[in-house]
Image (cartoon, rainbow, N blue to C red):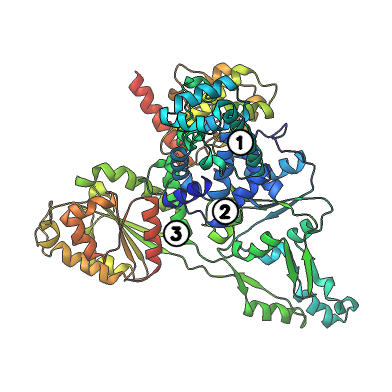
Amino acid sequence: MTRFTGTDSYVATPDLMMAVNAAVTLGRPLLIKGEPGTGKTQLASEIARALSRPLFEWHIKSTSKALHGLYEYDAVSRLRDSQLGEEKVHDIRNYIMKGSLWEAFESDTQPVLLIDEIDKADIEFPNDLLRELDRMEFYVHETRALVKARHRPVILITSNNEKELPDAFLRRCFFHYIRFPDADTMEKIVRVHYPDLKQELLREALTTFFNVRDTPGLRKKPSTSELLDWIKLLLAEDIPPEALRSDDPKKTIPVLHGALLKNEQDVHLFEQLVFLNRRAGR
Amino acid sequence: MLVRFFTDLRAGGVPVTLPEFLSLLEALEARVASLSAEEFYYLARMSMVKDERHFDRFDRVFAEHFEGAEKLFEKLVAELPEEWLRQLTERLLNEEEKRRVESLGGWDKLLETLRQRLAEQRERHEGGNKWIGTGGTSPFGNQGFNPEGVRMGQGGSRHRRAVKVWDARDYRNLDDEVELGTRNLKMALRRLRRFAREGAAEELDLDGTIDATARNAGLLDLKLQPERRNAVKLLLLLDVGGSMDPHVKVCEELFSAARAEFKHLEYFYFHNFPYERLWKDNRRRFSVATDTFTLLRTFNPDYRVVFVGDATMSPYEIEEPGGSVEHWNEESGRVWMTRIAAHFPRLVWLNPEPEDRWQWTPSVEITRGLVGGRMFPLTLEGLDRAMRQLKHRAV
């Protein structure tokens, strides 16, 4: 079996690789947590690509029910069809729509299934999936059929910690917390996305970025994805590295800061700090 | 050895269950991890710890338990030179043990046994029962294969990393029993938010459905509407000034962040203890203040009340009329607090002082009694308990 070691567009740390490989080998769901913008969702498609497996995605909303992932029985349209006297009304299977989990179960090769942002759903949602994740099978009551997974899918579950997940659910998963990358890893990540970036600009951008992140009291710290956007902007605007470098990075607001700071209180706070620093520096 | 690690983890406050431990063994058996301490660490963590809050506790137990075990891993990988072994045993065994060794058939035979045993151990190890096994019966004594014992004094060079992952304790501020700092404030807010929102389902809009079906000439047309959410109303009462100064920053951070999370959120300040007046603007506290009676009339009992204060003061400030440090209060703080507590059945007091210090300050104990024991420390874990408490009515 091939092992996941990251891809040409995704830098994986050793602990992440370990987590993914263990989950793949043992066929157990992997729960991924971490700051927003650290590539939780992206991981699934990268795994699917690296191991060349089909990918199924199930994005959770606050109104999602566990049953939606399995199948949906469209009783209303059946009722309507019966009023209209349609022929297909006699076969209930015409009104059962497969969810992502069902489709993943039916895949010919071992698929990757992403259950994105599970914490957005109602608190009972994970509990309703216990049997499905454990045994990889479920029962369709309408047709009295048992659907079993042909190959245990690699299930990736992401969470933003908005709700506590039930213990019974956690017990069945492996868990990985994606830490915010340190400077070295960050450099690798940027390199992967912008291989032609000049070393000088990269270094200046990273210094500025980590400075902004270290500003105390920010409501929303800029994340990896925001850094990448920002660098894209810098490249598009053709900003020279000198523009990022000043005598003291704390004394100026970085150019195009709109990509890094996303709310006006943060921008305001940052401006004030810069102002204070400048005054103190004089 | 692993079983003890498991029980140690539980004793160390990491909620590990048996199935999780078994899944670690299963993973080891499936040879997911190779022979390195680091990989074992990652594997153990991902299979047994399901919440980043517990990472730090896990790290501590791991470090304690496997101190020096890195060398054990290396030893298992390396082929052992005879000379090295002889030296090792000579260094480790005392005279009497050496005599016992002789009685077992002399050095050569013993070395043979040892090598066999090591090979055996490696196989078993690959088979999965890492570290569980042969040690106890070895003529060398368990010490010989214990990480403590095999400290060969080869200095730091054998370490591959200067700081081991689990010793770095990177996850310290994710632990929920440390005081709130900037990082975990965010977590604290998530707890608050979790408490603020509950249930989000759709329900049948009966009127809409009838209407739409009628318009549709009798063909059924279902209409759904989002269920009305039970929006939590929160009243925040914050202690400012005086003894609270070191805590003001934490409180303000929590407070300013909380403002964005709640739709129905009102806040008032008080100094040390609530009396007949509260205010919204700390700078104009003497000119623009709100009568506490007005407060009780304005906010109905379904508001949940959160006090934030260290409740550290002279007991007179609570017990006596005129006890306040900055004005003459006609009625004592106790009277006012009783009124507030009677009006708002859902009420908690968050105290930034560490919980174990409360009992040494009489005023904290009095306040705690006045709020019916519902005082919680200003830590993530305390906040959790407080929010759980807020869902229920008075005890």
* Figure quadrant of residue B40: top right
How far is disc 3 from disc 1 in space, using C-alphas? 68 Å
Label 1: chain letter: B
Task: Report the disc number at residue B263.
Answer: 3
The vertical placement of A134 against A210, above or below, is below
What secondary structure is marked by label 3?
A: loop
Q: Nearer the viewer, mark 3 or mark 1?
A: 1
* Figure quadrant of residue A125: bottom right
Q: Which residue is mark 2?
A: B20
Q: Nearer the viewer, mark 1 or mark 2?
A: 1
Q: In the shown orientation, is residue A269 left or right of residue B328? A: right
Q: Can residue A42 be seen here?
A: no
Q: Which residue is mark 1?
A: B117
Q: Amino acid at mark 1?
A: Arg
Q: Residues within 10 Å of mark 1 (few under 14, many from 20)?
A: some
Q: Residues within 10 Å of mark 2 (few under 14, many from 20)?
A: many
The vertical placement of A66 against B145, above or below, is below
Tag 2–tag 3 contact (CB < 8 Å) = no
Image position, residue A154 (x, y; %): 71, 50
Q: Amino acid at mark 2?
A: Glu
- Is B281 or B192 nearer to us in this picture? B192
Q: Earlier in the sequence, mark 3 or mark 1?
A: 1
List the single residue furthest toward the right. A87
Q: Can residue B8 be seen here?
A: yes
- Is B115 or B221 nearer to us in this picture? B115
